[in-house]
Amino acid sequence: MVTRLPHLSLLLAFKTVAEHGSFTRAADLLHLSQSAVSQQVVRLEEALGVQLFVRSTRSVSLTSAGHDLLNDIRGAFDELVVAFDRCARKGEAPTLHVEAEPVLSAFWLTPRLKQFTQRFPGLQIKLLLTTQRVEFPREVEFAIKWGDGHWPGFDAEFLLGLNYAPVCSPSLLKGPKALLLPADLQHYQLLHDRNADDWDRWHQQFPEVPLNFQRGHVVTDSNVLAQLAAAGHGVALCALELVESQLRHGELVTPFPQMTMRHWLAYHVLTRRHQMLSEVATQFVAWLKAEAAAADQNPPRA
């Protein structure tokens, strides 16, 4: 029977080895020698009276008792880290580190952000902008990413879906070759975001439109895509929620507003598994969800 709590250093050594599957890697992370980490794990096993790892010359794996212990202490350790971090930052202006996609940050998040920062006058927000990848450095508490909802190693919660429609410069609606009917799309350059998948899906939804969706210009940035369309280089398939300002100011128009496609991907909030968010991050995520729900109930008019 264990009459007192083992020293936290023993539990930390066990947790680090268990999560990384290696005494060598754990020793590097803890800035200790491999033998010191091994001795700490042995001392913990002796204190508990159970074997926590199955060791071999090439690998280390958890026993059933080891799995149970890891699951039991992981949440408590994460809470301790949050508590120590919160205490260390007392008196400092709170800083919220968020990873997000550039186009969402520029055209959806930024116009709304003042509503949240007014509630936290001293809050500093640091945005890490990444596209098509998840970096998630240690200081970042959560990320807002575009995808199918599956990111290995992270919990993902749906945030915002987008509605796509053809958009172009108002100049394309004038003149002898004006873009007036969906069939007229075959006479114009198509503008693609990374590849032809979006136009392919759109054509599947509206097969009556004669369209060679493989042709046209390709860019790898949604912001540049909208700029190309506004400059009259062709017709782009854009998320109405992300070009709302250009539509409102007449820089872009939707020639066929009835031909809108709900995209099969969406924005999600990614968090680390088994790690609690700080109070300000929790409130920020709740505010994001409320803003996204409101935007979904009142989508921009095509």
Image (tube, rainbow, N blue to C red):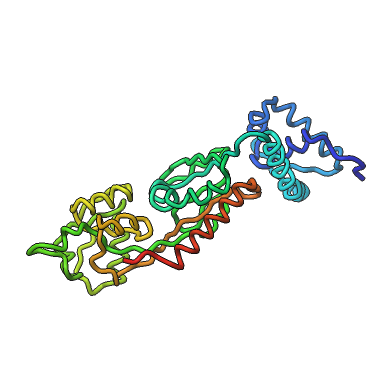
Q: Say if 161 sits above or below 75 in the image.
A: below
Please provide percent x and percent y for residue 71: 73, 50
Q: Residue at x 64, y 47 (%)?
A: 279
Q: Nearer the viewer, residue 291 or 121?
A: 121
What is the count of numbered marks?
Answer: 0
Q: Quadrant of the N terminus?
A: top right
Residue 247 screen position, x and y as percent: 29, 59
Who is closer to the viewer here, 114 or 45? 114
Identify the image quadrant of residue 261: bottom left
Q: Quadrant of the C terminus?
A: bottom left
Residue found 78% across the figure and 30% down from its top = 39
* Residue 152 pos. (x, y %): 54, 51
Q: Specify whether 255 is left or right of 73.
A: left
* Residue located 21% across and 57% down the image: 169
Q: Is residue 157 above or below residue 31?
A: below
Residue at the bottom extreme of this rendering = 208
Q: Residue at x 55, y 55 (%)?
A: 287
Q: Is residue 176 left or right of residue 236?
A: left
For the question of whether residue 230 can be seen, the reply is: yes
Depth check: 234 or 113 in front? 113
